[in-house]
Image (spheres, grey):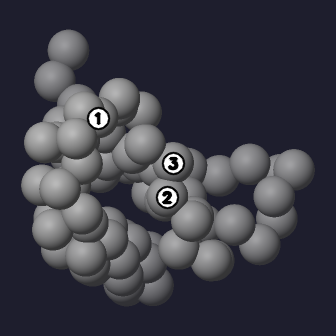
């Protein structure tokens, strides 16, 4: 099965949360309510430095994805 790069997630236990799941490496879920990121990968020291450099861009892409999806619902 081919998955989209980003998926929106919802959970009634967290009514104010807006979850975006990134399905490609490095896999993570971000709560856009507070920008809290949970990684699904284990990183070694070398990976950690690379991820830190990429994190800002990945969060921006996740936020852009959410904005695009919301705009499509409003149309």
Alpha carbon of mark 2 to alpha carbon of mark 1: how far?
14 Å
Q: Which mark is residue 33?
A: none
With respect to residue 55, does 40 lie above or below?
A: above
Contact flag, marks 2 and 3 (Cβ < 8 Å): yes
Contact flag, marks 2 and 1 (Cβ < 8 Å): no
Question: Dot 1: what SS?
Answer: loop
**Residue tagged 3:** 38
On the picture, is 28 further left or further right than 68? right
**Residue tagged 2:** 37
Alpha carbon of mark 2 to alpha carbon of mark 3: how far?
4 Å
> Residue most toward the right?
13
On the picture, is 33 further left or further right than 53? right
* Residue 29 percent coordinates (x, y): 46, 49
Question: Dot 2: what SS?
Answer: strand
Alpha carbon of mark 1 to alpha carbon of mark 3: how far?
13 Å
Quarter-of-image position of residue 39? top left
Sequence-wise, the earlier of marks 1 and 3 is 3
Camera-side residue of 3 and 22:
22
Q: Which mark is residue 43?
A: 1
Sequence-wise, the earlier of marks 2 and 1 is 2
* Residue 46 percent coordinates (x, y): 13, 42
Question: Dot 3: what SS?
Answer: strand
* Residue 64 percent coordinates (x, y): 27, 79
With respect to residue 35, does 54 lie above or below?
A: above
Q: Quadrant of the C terminus?
A: bottom left
> Residue most toward the top?
1
Is there any visible trace of residue 61 in the rendered image? no
């Amino acid at each position: 099965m081919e998955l989209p790069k980003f998926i929106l997630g919802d959970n009634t236990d967290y009514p104010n949360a807006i979850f975006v799941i990134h399905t490609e490496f490095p896999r993570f879920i971000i709560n856009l309510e507070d920008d809290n990121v949970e990684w699904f990968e284990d990183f070694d020291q070398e990976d950690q430095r690379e991820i830190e450099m990429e994190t800002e861009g990945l969060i921006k892409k996740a936020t852009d994805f959410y904005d695009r999806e919301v705009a499509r619902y409003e149309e």
